[in-house]
Image (cartoon, rainbow, N blue to C red):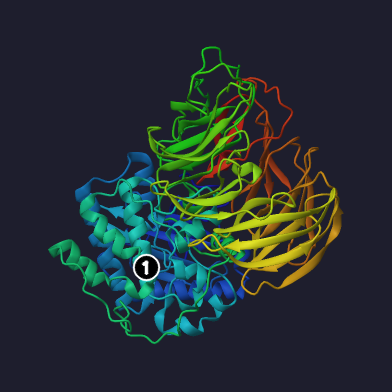
Amino acid sequence: MALRETDPAEVGGYRIEDRLGSGGMGVVYLARSASGRRLALKVVHAQYADDDEFRLRFRREVAAARQVSGAFTAPVVDADADAPRPWMATLYIPGEDLGTHVRRHGPLPLPRLRELAAGLAEAIRDIHRAGMVHRDLKPANVMLAEDGPRVIDFGISRATEFAASDVLTQTGRVMGTPPFMSPEQFSSPQDVGPAADVFSLGSVVAYAATGHGPFDSQSPYETALRVVDGDAELDGVPSELLPFVHLCLDKHPKSRPSPDELLRLLRDGELPGPRPADETPTVVDIARPRRRRGRLWLASAAGAVALAAVATTTVALNGDDSRPGNPGGNVPLGWQAWHNKSKAPTADEDPVEADSPFRRCGATGRSLVCAGDDVMATRFALADGSNTWARPIDETPDEIGGADRGTILAARSGRVYVYGADDRASDDDTFPTRFTVQALDAETGKVIWKTVTGDGEEATEPNRDQGFSISVPAGIVAVYGDRARQYALLDADDGKVRWKRPLPDSDRQSCLLRSAARNAYLVCQKWTGDEVTGTSLAQLDPATGRPRWTVSVEGGQDIVGQADGRLVVLKTTGSHRTLTLINAATHIVTTVRLSQTQPENAAPALLNGRLYFTFPSGSVRAFAPDSGRRLWESNSTVESSGPPTASTTHLYLASPSGRLAALNLRTGKVEATLQGRDDGGTADSTGLGAPLTLVGNALYVPYGIRSVYTVDVRDL
């Protein structure tokens, strides 16, 4: 990477020869000492030189790196934390970092995977023996040297003896890179110990084996939740290494093995024995306060993700310039910019012509699966857009026209959950419909299971966009029965009905299913005559479907999401003057007045703890839900946008034609736009754009008629 005119000729007496990489906190140069030794020299950006807390953190990084000297780390040669621009020089390690290597060449073969796992286990053993915790083990911090992997960058490490009293952590900064962080780094950052590095080790090995992290999701927010509560996606990890990875990824720190136990497992196949409840799998004997119990709420996870993106001193020692983006900073393996239109999946002899965009897409594994416009599901390859299969919403040939049905209920662990609608004519000139929820293999489109949720004229379409189904960790909760008088949980694995419960009196109440923070809610509006007089919101027990608790509020209201442990609830009609906040733990209800009243046509969305209102004209307004204060207002230039999507740095909106805008999350400034496309046809409907899907730094935009394009957001 060529030097720039502003780059120094030398730093600390070391001659600068090349630029190796750049990140949010500094620049890394290839330097040479007087004796000819090549060094990787990190120089902090000028804007952080006057930050006393940052200097303290940098001094800690230098001290940590000096303490760790092993065969699988990069030794410190020299440093000056008191220089006008602090710097540190380590031995230069030629080669690619693991992330770059996997993106360019694909997953590692089994022999190299075993070498990687053993080398990293030895590296974190040496780090822990020095009394340190790395806290940011990730592919970008693993160099693939000729003699084995090397762990670099101790920018957010800390001494274990200071873990409980670390002032820098107690300021609220949650440190790490979300897809490779441990659950405790989100839920209890001041209590993080050596076991966190073991968890990250499991994630890194899984990434090296598959090309994606075990908890990768469509947004940083969902990634954080999956790390804390979700199951790891380990399809593609060789069976020989599955025990190693499974042990590392135990959610409970005390249940994870020590590095020495992992090495014995790799060498001898010896599994760690049962661990006493009071035994901590660490090399250094330290006393730590008890870990806080309790659930990680939405805003906590989202806030942790955002802070982690800006509060580290991590800079890769080899590779391209680091640009603002999303967890891992990657795009799917083999990705290239593409656009494509779905094939027409229909069983009818005289099908209705396609005329609408997709309603929703979802990503899992190597697949982007979309639905809508009577397409039950169609698959595009994330990397190149190949449209490999498509299934119609109604798979029975008939003469009945379509009804623009179809949406994605959920996509995870290599499966996509969708619904089918089999319309048929009867002898009495009615058209009953049999609705099903189905789980499909995202790669092949094969039906894994299919469950009928209702059959008849009064059966209800299990459409999540209409509030008649939701996804929860255990499966799909959907309105159920031929007269839609119940709701039921369909098991994620086999589709069996695990429980079903009656809906409240449908003659006097209208109820919708909602979800927030991985919990299911039943929101019922009570009608008196033609007026909605009140709303009840009940959190459902996932084991039984019965309400855990119920809160009643005045008028017609609905759940927008959850932030800082509180449900955010808004009126469903009229202007938005206030927010209703319901503490999900204590059920205490408070109201917050918005600093600016929002009109009825403003569409709300809660992302990463921030409330956004979007308008058909393209305007966007951002509010802090805890105070009601307006943070910014902007004209996105995108008319009729669908629900926005957020990364750690930007808000993205798109129109039905695919016009795209990227807004700075902090200021609302429009920093990039793309014109709409005309190669996907023009939809007849006058609806809004579809939700966008973000996979790492690859953004997938539905547009036109059954079409999708993708762009690397770093290139906007």
Where is residue 399? Give x, y as percent: 57, 16
Where is residue 297? Give x, y as percent: 58, 66
Q: Residue at x 52, y 26 (%)?
A: 394
Above or below for 573 versus 59: above
Where is residue 671? Give x, y as percent: 69, 43
Q: Is residue 469 left or right of residue 232?
A: right
Residue at mark 1: 197
Camera sees residue 73:
no
Q: Residue furthest left?
A: 268
Hey, which quadrant is residue 304 in on the image? bottom right
Above or below for 390 versus 671: above
Q: Is residue 429 left or right of residue 112?
A: right
Q: How many marks?
A: 1
Camera sees residue 452:
yes
408 vs 592, nearest the viewer: 408
Q: Quadrant of the C terminus?
A: top right
Where is residue 95? Give x, y as percent: 32, 50
Q: Residue at x 77, y 64 (%)?
A: 553
Q: Report the amino acid beneath label 1.
A: Asp
Q: Residue at x 63, y 28 (%)?
A: 404
512 vs 294, nearest the viewer: 512
Mark 1 neighbour class, 10 Å CA radius: few under 14, some 14 to 19, many 20 or more: many
Q: Residue furthest top?
A: 350
